[in-house]
Amino acid sequence: MVNRKPKSEHPLPEFCWIDVPDADCEGSWVQEEGCAARGVIRRLKRDHGLEPENMFLISPFRDCARWLRECLQKQRLWVTDKDK
């Protein structure tokens, strides 16, 4: 049996695929995908009140995870315990 969660005051947008052309890549890291991720994080925060520390970003590639972390730290969108 599955129990449904109550509806949130700020429902999140529907799941979707964001197509990002890979014009500039460095290994598995695609710069444009990093820009798209920043935009999604900003919109979730602005439109839905979701704080970045409550978001999870998942990548199957270590270099992508590292580049994304560095990119988001520069934009102050990545928070770690040592940043607080």
Image (tube, helix red, strand yellow):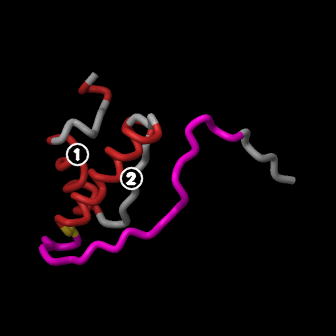
Q: Which sits in the foreground, 38 or 59?
A: 38
Instruction: Determine the residue positioned at 82% across, 52% down.
Output: 2
Q: CA distance from mark 2 to mark 1?
A: 11 Å
Compared to residue 66, the image places residue 60 above or below, namely below
* Residue under label 1: 72
Residue 68's image quarter?
Answer: bottom left
Residue 25's image quarter?
Answer: bottom left
Image location (x, y in percent) of residue 20 = 28, 72
Compared to residue 31, the image places residue 45 above or below, namely above
CB under 8 Å between discs 2 and 1: yes
Residue 26 covered by magenta stretch: yes
Callout 1 amino acid = Leu
Mark 2 element type: loop
Residue 32 covered by magenta stretch: no
Instruction: Determine the residue positioned at 52% across, 53% down.
Output: 13
Which residues, given as a range, are shown in magenta? Answer: 7-28
Mark 1 neighbour class, 10 Å CA radius: few under 14, some 14 to 19, many 20 or more: some
Q: Is the C terminus in the top left, top right, bottom left or bottom right quadrant?
A: top left
Image location (x, y in percent) of residue 15 = 52, 62
Predominant SS along the magenta part: loop
Judge left or right: residue 41 versus residue 83.
right
Mark 1 element type: helix
Residue 24's image quarter?
Answer: bottom left
Compared to residue 24, the image places residue 59 above or below, namely above
* Residue under label 2: 57
Q: Which residue is most to the right? A: 1
Image location (x, y in percent) of residue 72 = 22, 45
Judge left or right: residue 52 versus residue 62.
right
